[in-house]
């Protein structure tokens, strides 16, 4: 049955923000991290750089109102510009880098994996950072080391040509019925040597699946979700995964993936054996980056994708809300939006986030503006599936 989709008006929830990432607790608290403008003189680490300062907001009423979130260590802290960009400073202040993956477990604990697991050491192991919240996102404890043995992986360079010495957790931590966790990761393996056309120092990626039986303290490699050096500008990266609970394929894992920075198609594949084997990746008729994916309470699949083409921003930079009523067999665009007349800027990095806040009611976050722009903010819209 075709669902009716209603999208509400925009409201601003964080000034100066870009590229929101979002997690919802078991009780409904919504915690968001976004990039904010770095201060003059910010010193960056020699590798795995993020040239911004993370900022956090939290809502406890389904996104209607928001407050700034601060860790205990952040309050009244004095930090020099030469310290602020370093991971050890964030760790000391209790500031998670949530450009990674997070989930609420069945017991109410929220787990958060930071975006990059650094390495490798001499035995081919990478070390990630995991945070825990056991007080409904009031605070986080950690980070605790997370061990990823992946000797077949290798290091390289990012899309700006900077050294990139790790494997990247992105979007999805998924708790299985037996309590194990699945995580979607993108990285390079030995032999993944095809250069990206817009940044030849960076090679095309693959997406892989990891599994943990000890609450993310260690991981084991399960499978490659997708790899094909002929696909797109970047191969397969920025995956997001949902486990279907309804329809004709309960238990199916469905993954959407980015394949490039400039108007490349989103690809999809699935697994019916908890990720041991995957269907051949297929392109959707949807172009864009950083998809987010939710199975709504009634089984409808809802995804939010930011279309982006840096060479044609006026026509090809906007957000697409897409819907599938048949478990991902077919998708349709239900709504599109971009900046508003009052925005003060006509750009976006096209990064969204999506979560269901109550049955049939979803919250979409997204950015307006871009790096170096004087106007940047995180916008929000309510989405109803009827």
Image (spheres, helix red, strand yellow):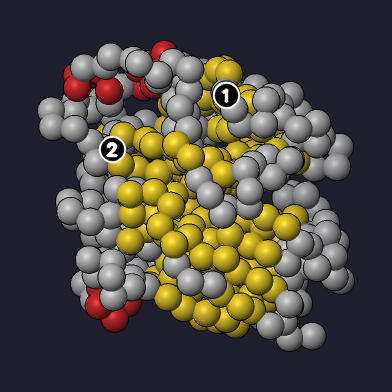
Residue 53: name its quadrant. Answer: top left
Q: Residue at x 67, y 25 (%)?
A: 135
Picture quadrant of residue 299: bottom right
Please rate how many residues cluster around mark 1, counting C-alpha atoms within 10 Å: few if below 14, some from 14 to 19, many from 20: some
* Identity of the residue drawn at 57% across and 52% down: 63
**Which residue reaches farthest left?**
41
The crowding category of the residue bearing disc 2, from other C-alpha atoms within 10 Å (few below 14, some 14 to 19, many at least 20), is some
Q: Residue at x 53, y 19 (%)?
A: 143
**Residue 121 can be seen, yes or no:** no
Residue 383 visible in the snapshot: yes
Which residue matches tag 1?
139
Quarter of the image where the N terminus is located: bottom right
Spot occupied by residue 186 in the image (x, y as percentages of width and height): 49, 46
269 relative to 13, above or below: below
Front one among 41 and 47: 41
Q: Which mark is residue 109?
A: none
Q: Secondary structure at mark 1?
A: loop
- Residue drawn at (27%, 23%) of the image: 84
Q: Position of residue 210 (x, y in %)?
A: 64, 39
Quadrant of the drawing holding the C terminus: bottom right
* Left or right of residue 5, residue 70 in this image: left
Q: Nearer the viewer, residue 329 or 34?
A: 34
Is 338 drawn above or below residue 145 in the view shown? below
Between label 1 and label 2, give the one nearer the viewer: 1
Mark 2 falls on what kind of element? loop
Residue carrying label 2:
52
* Mark 1 or 2, nearer chain start: 2
Q: Position of residue 100 (x, y in %)?
A: 50, 40
Image-quadrant location for residue 78: top left
Q: CA distance from mark 1 to mark 2?
A: 22 Å
Query: Residue 277 or 243: which is nearer the viewer?
Result: 243
Q: From what the image shows, is residue 28 above or below residue 262?
A: above
């Amino acid at each position: 049955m075709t669902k009716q989709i209603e999208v509400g008006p925009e409201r601003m929830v964080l000034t100066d923000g870009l590229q929101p990432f979002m997690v919802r607790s078991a009780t409904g608290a919504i915690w968001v991290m976004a990039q904010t403008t770095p201060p003059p003189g910010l010193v960056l680490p020699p590798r795995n750089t993020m040239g911004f300062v993370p900022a956090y907001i939290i809502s406890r009423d389904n996104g209607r109102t928001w407050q700034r979130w601060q860790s205990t260590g952040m309050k009244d802290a004095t930090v020099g510009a030469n310290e602020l960009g370093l991971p050890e400073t964030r760790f000391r202040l209790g500031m998670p880098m949530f450009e990674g993956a997070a989930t609420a477990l069945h017991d109410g604990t929220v787990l958060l994996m930071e975006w990059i697991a650094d390495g490798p050491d001499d035995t081919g192991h990478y070390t990630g950072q995991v945070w825990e919240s056991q007080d409904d996102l009031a605070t986080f404890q950690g980070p605790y080391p997370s061990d990823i043995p992946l000797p077949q992986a290798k290091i390289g360079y990012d899309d700006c040509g900077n050294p990139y010495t790790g494997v990247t957790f992105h979007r999805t931590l998924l708790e299985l019925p037996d309590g194990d966790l699945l995580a979607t990761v993108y990285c390079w393996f030995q032999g993944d040597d095809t250069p990206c056309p817009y940044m030849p120092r960076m090679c095309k990626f693959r997406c892989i699946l990891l599994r943990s039986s000890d609450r993310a303290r260690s991981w084991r490699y399960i499978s490659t979700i997708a790899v094909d050096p002929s696909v797109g500008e970047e191969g397969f990266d920025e995956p997001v995964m949902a486990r279907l609970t309804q329809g004709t394929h309960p238990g199916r894992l469905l993954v959407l993936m980015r394949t490039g920075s400039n108007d490349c198609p989103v690809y999809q594949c699935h697994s019916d054996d908890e990720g041991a084997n995957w269907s051949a990746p297929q392109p959707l008729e949807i172009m864009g980056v950083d998809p987010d994916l939710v199975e709504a309470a009634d089984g409808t699949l809802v995804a939010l994708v930011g279309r982006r083409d840096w060479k044609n921003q006026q026509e090809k930079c906007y957000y697409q809300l897409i819907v599938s009523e048949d478990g991902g067999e077919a998708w349709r665009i239900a709504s599109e939006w971009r900046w508003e007349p009052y925005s003060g800027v006509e750009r976006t990095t096209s990064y969204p986030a999506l979560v269901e806040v109550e049955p049939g009611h979803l919250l979409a976050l997204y950015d307006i503006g871009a790096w170096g722009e004087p106007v940047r903010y995180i916008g929000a819209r309510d989405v109803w599936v009827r």
